[in-house]
Amino acid sequence: MIDSLNSAQIAALFALTPAIDQVGIHERIGRIQTRSIKGTAKLQGLRMALSMIDLTTLEGKDTLGKVRQLCFKAQHLHDQATGLPTVAAVCVYPTMVAEAKKALVSSNIKVASVSTAFPAGQAPFEVKKLDTLYAVDNGADEIDMVISRGRFLAGDYQFVYDEIAAIKALCGQARLKVIFETGELDTLDQIRKMSDLAIAAGADFIKTSTGKIQPAATFPVVLTMLGAIKDHFDKTGQMIGMKPAGGISSAKLALQHLLLVKEVLGEAWLTNEWYRFGASSLANDLLLQYQKQVTGKYQSATYFSID
Amino acid sequence: MEILKTYKLYIGGQFPRTESGRTYPVRGANGNHVANACLGSRKDVRNAVQAARKAQSAWAVRSGFNRSQILYRIAEILEDRKAQFVSELISMGSSTADAQNEVQSSIDRCVYYAGWSDKYQALLSSVNPVATPHFNFSVPEAMGVVGVVSCQRTGLIGLISQILPVILGGNTIVVIANSDQPLGAISFAEVLATSDVPGGVVNILTGQIAELLPTLAGHMDVNALSLAYIDADLLKAAQEVAIDNLKRCSVYAEDFTLQTSQGLAFISTFQEIKTTWHPIEQLSGGGSGY
């Protein structure tokens, strides 16, 4: 287990956190957004994006039936099309993990569970630990925890750090994704700070948002977080995964995100081991664009399974 | 100094320039350069269909009465801007008398179709006698997104005659305007934008039919086509690509200025009939067939 940090150590950690050049970030994003990917590169990109999806259902009205349907979709994205991958994982609430594991038993698709009183994270620490243990015991391959945003904004970095480190210790073999809920962190500097804190506390992945709050995975936010991953890699040689979630619902956006990660981190991150999209409706748009590319005709959602 | 209007497209309630950035000159009767219009591209078609699809379900669930009020509002705004439409038609080659007649007929047609909005359902519906214990009834439902190539002989009345009966039935549409006389179509879009017609219900593109129609006709998310006065080869090609999702293609060659070019048939063509079998308790001792 990673040891707790005292305030001096936290100060030392943040001393290495650079200030974010917001204007520079926006300019770089602007260039990414004017690029267009066509032909075979587009097909490859669409397939890659599909293979990186954490197909997600996180609603109060979720049922076991809905989860089974989602797991079926995860394995059969569009059977009429050949050469399609499956998604990387399905992402559900802890109570749905056992059902999802059962439904995906014959596939390589991982089951990710949100945890620590998702989405608000406003629960006692003991409850958060139980929440995580429940998911892990039911077979979750990945844990998506939320941070205590209130504590972070109040400057209680030590609390946030300890919480992440403690949850990481409970995960065992499961990989830990740390959700910042960037829409509540307000500034890019805060987001960079949180990235450095989460990485130091043992996050395997850093993830932008819960999907419940807007704005979510915007380009400036993602670029800021990728910068933290890059700096950490340059310093230690250790790779950290990235998962933008919320608001990426079109194939065009997904491809631009892939461009960004390739430019900032390099091709090593272009696999679902290190990069994920948290999404529900993105899969269908990728499929529509894929079929458009194959058939030459613009497609209709009518002919694709519901998401 | 005179300020000239930039004629743009009408997509999703906005007036964007064409994605392609191209324009083409619109010429008047004597060949003079009247204005530039956007030379739309297939990506504009894609964007327009997307906007139309997004708007369709919300438009279809509005009450017929509400759609009626909105159509009547179109007539009111058109009346208000009569002079502008007359002068636009004249600039594109109409005589003064023809232009005045066309605009007046257009306003009349709006009022005419406004009246139909909450009445066609009753005429197209039926309760059907069946031999089983079911209450069996049929009702019209909007087809969805309709692609329109508007009349290539008129600048306004044909456009209106093809748009209104389609949208009043809960469909949303993507229109390719008259290529030679597109100005009236874009000015009409301004009327729509200020008549409480929700964005995306009507989308209007300008450009070359030969370039835009194949994409529109082949688009899997377009449910029907309304084509007026188009070249035989283009029509054949459009019908061929329309097969994949069984689009209903309606081909018009009428004089839309005439009063005979309006009526229930223009509405019912863009409706599907849904029949429902509702189980009921076995009624004792015969009698009613439903």
Image (cartoon, helix red, strand yellow):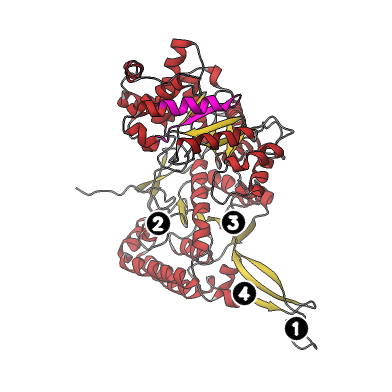
Instruction: Name which residue type carries label 4.
Output: Leu
* Residue B124, numbered circle: 4
* Residue A235, numbered circle: none
SS under mark 2: helix
Q: Residues within 10 Å of mark 1 (few under 14, many from 20)?
A: some
Q: In the rendered structure, are the residues bearing label 3 and label 4 in contact, judged by CB atoms less than 8 Å apart? A: no
Query: Which is more foreground, mark 3 or mark 4?
Result: 4
Same-chain status of marks 2 and 3? yes
SS under mark 4: helix
Distance from the alpha carbon under mark 1 to that under mark 3:
38 Å
Q: Check disc 2 and report the residue beneath it.
A: B189
Instruction: Name which residue type carries label 1.
Output: Gly
Give the residue displayed 49% in from the left and 55% down from the top. Answer: B55
Residue B130 x %, y %: 77, 77
Tell which subunit mark 2 falls on. Answer: B
Residue B153 x %, y %: 49, 59
Residue B162 x %, y %: 51, 63
Q: Check disc 3 and report the residue beneath it.
A: B225
Residue A106 x %, y %: 74, 33
Instruction: Name which residue type carries label 3.
Output: Leu
Question: Is residue B47 magenta-colored?
Answer: no
Q: Check disc 1 and report the residue beneath it.
A: B289
Mark 1 vs 4, N-terminal side: 4
Pick the residue in front: B241 or B253: B241
Give the magenta-colored segment's residue range: A161-182
Distance from the alpha carbon under mark 3 to that under mark 4:
21 Å
